[in-house]
Amino acid sequence: SSLYPSNIRQVNIGPETFVHDVPQEIQDNILNGLTVEKLVNKEIDTALLKKYDMSLSGNGMLYRRDGKSFLSELMEKFFNKRKDYKKLMKEAAQQYEATKDQSWEDRRKIYRIKQLATKVLINSAYGAVGNAFFQFFSVENAEAITITGKVAILTVEKGINDYLNKLLKTDGVERVCAIDTDSYYIVLDDLVQALMPNETDKQKIVDFLDKMYQAKLGPEIQRICSELGDYLNSYQKVLEMSRENIADTGVWTGKKRYFMNVWIPKEFIIQNQKQK
């Protein structure tokens, strides 16, 4: 959910919180030889971060935790504003379905435009920080945003694979078949075969996977995100991920070029009918 803005908030990235004079103890024991891979595999003891009350980013930049950066405040403000607009948009849609009053449909369109505009505003923060004409331009801060995202996405990928290998009693099987900037695609054929042998009803399989995500995989992903926040001594833990689709087929022709045959869980269909 809004990976780059969440990284700004989580690490407390900002020009006024950036640590210019790094304690030698941290330089020697944490930053010396630091790599994304070492952070993902938790090969570095980050306990010193608590001693100095500093948050660590993926590229080795440090940020103070004694106050919220102005960028973090902006991201939080606009993030919550967008949630409000999306809620109002949904309520307007429900009112229109119930009354067929065109004024509610007009409101829905207005709130939709507002939430989209707010989304663009939120996502522009990283671009601004990396723009040489921006007052608070900083290559270090821009890289901190993106590389922290890389650490997060690879950490969760590793955690998903480890969790499913433990669940299915396998070793070294990579069920995450593709990764994008802020998303994963997970193949669960063998999980279905193990827990629903000989089942051919695809709707039942989809419903099972939806419930399995809600009860097991989703909470495990949130646990991994929370654990990463502790490991980097983050200012706040706001990194969240959720399931987007369940599909029985997917075809990739290149980076960001794919299509999927998406199924809808029965529970979602029932809830949608009740709302209408």
Image (tube, helix red, strand yellow):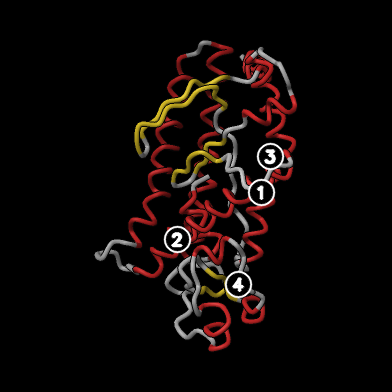
Q: Between marks 2 and 3, how big is the CA–CA gap?
A: 25 Å
Residue 162: numbered disc: 1
Between discs 1 and 3, the one toward the N terminus: 1
Q: Position of 245 compared to 274: left or right?
A: left
Q: Between marks 1 and 3, how big is the CA–CA gap?
A: 12 Å
Label 1 Cα crowd, 10 Å radius (few <14 / some 14-19 / many 20+): some
The local secondary structure at tag 4 comes to loop
- Given residues 144 and 276, the one toward you in this image is 144
Q: Between marks 4 and 3, how big is the CA–CA gap?
A: 27 Å
Query: Residue at image x 48%, y 55%?
Result: 75
The local secondary structure at tag 2 comes to helix
Looking at numbered disc 4 in the image, what kind of residue is underneath it? Answer: Ile
Estimate the x, y position of residue 68 in percent, counting from the top left: 55, 67
Estimate the x, y position of residue 255 in percent, counting from the top left: 36, 39
The local secondary structure at tag 1 comes to helix
Q: Which residue is mark 3?
A: 217
- Answer whether labels 4 and 3 touch (C-beta < 8 Å): no
Say which of marks 4 and 1 sits in front. 1
Quarter that holds the C terminus: top right
The local secondary structure at tag 3 comes to helix
Q: Between marks 2 and 1, how big is the CA–CA gap?
A: 22 Å
Between discs 2 and 3, the one toward the N terminus: 2
Q: Which residue is mark 2?
A: 147
Looking at numbered disc 2 in the image, what kind of residue is underneath it? Answer: Ile
Say which of marks 4 and 2 sits in front. 4
Q: Between marks 4 and 1, how big is the CA–CA gap?
A: 20 Å
Query: Residue at image x 40%, y 33%?
Result: 113
Say which of marks 2 and 1 sits in front. 1
Between discs 4 and 3, the one toward the N terminus: 4
Residue 44: numbered disc: 4
